[in-house]
Amino acid sequence: MSAPTPYTATAEEAYLDRLLAARLLLPTNLPGIYARGSAFTQLMEGLERAITRYGRTESTQILRCPPVLPRSIVEKCGYFQSFPNLLGCMCCFTGGTTEHEALLSAVDSGADLLPHLELSDVVLAPAACYYVYPYLTGTLPQAGKTTDIENWCYRHEPSLNPMRMRAFRMREFVHAGTPEQALGFRDSWIERAQAFLARLGLSATVAPADDPFFGAGERLMAAQTLKFELLIPIVSDTRPTAVMSSNYHKDHFGHLFDIRTPDGAAAHTTCIGFGMERIVLALLAQHGLQLSKWPTALREHLGLA
């Protein structure tokens, strides 16, 4: 009998080991869930400032929301139909003393706790932009409206790939307006996003995404050129990582949330999303894990001490 083939860590797992050893990320006992160390946090804060300077204007609406979202919103948007495997639902205990004793017995015995809990009216937010659309209901200004939102998000895909965290932060600029305004916003940001990343010393390529977008019964594929991703080969040239994406939803959310242009038509929406942790991971892979050795101009751009 031949000896078993020894396990060889993937490039992604090897990168995770380096990040943990440098205490840029701090481990938990769960794959894909990490605390952020001091240097990682400094980079996140610097990136936030750079995005604000680059993308926010005086007319931009600013929105910051909790990491939980009303379940009714994801149901309305069709997330259960499109990505039920990624959604993190929250369950709560609502019983009395007798039910509590049964729950404790299940905890002590290691039994399934789900029969003792009830589905909550909130879920973990799977995307930052979901919070924006209900606040846009009604008639938009003549020039449309742009919203700057940042949120903690969760997607249930446990992995030792640090580029696929289960809990992460998304920063997005969401624009609602006429079809011409939405498409103009999207197209301009595809070019601006590459320039933004280049200022960080990162070279990205643009490619149509191959995943379906949200919506009950809909699979809006890349062939329709509705979603583009900016890809960077963080640890592998053959497996580049999407660090930003640009999505054009047509009038999908305009109809769902009764968002109208001044002429009464359903608004079209689009968004540009920054994967905050992924951009930081790309920066660390490109420039090294010791921030003090980074180029002076880049450190100044990000406001690093």
Image (cartoon, rainbow, N blue to C red):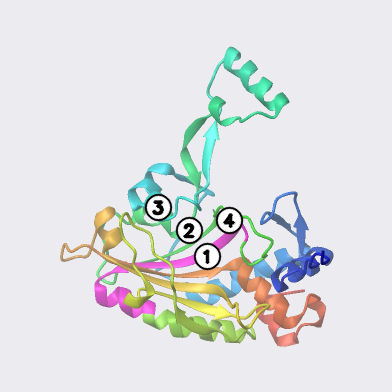
Identify the mark nearer the N-term, 3 or 4: 3
Identify the mark nearer the N-term, 1 or 2: 2
Q: Which mark is residue 79?
A: 3
Which quadrant of the rendered structure holds the C terminus? bottom right
**Do the residues under discs 1 and 4 have CB atoms within 8 angstroms?**
no
Q: Which residue is mark 2?
A: 128
Circle 4 residues within 10 Å: few <14, some 14–19, many ≥20: some
In percent of the image, x 53 and y 24: which residue is there?
Answer: 94
Q: CA distance from mark 1 to mark 4?
A: 20 Å
Q: Which residue is mark 4?
A: 157
Q: Closer to us: mark 1 or mark 4?
A: 4
Residue closest to the far top: 98
Quarter location, residue 303 = bottom right
Circle 3 residues within 10 Å: few <14, some 14–19, many ≥20: many
Q: Amino acid at mark 4?
A: Glu
- Confirm whether residue 109 shows in the render: yes
Q: Closer to us: mark 3 or mark 2?
A: 3
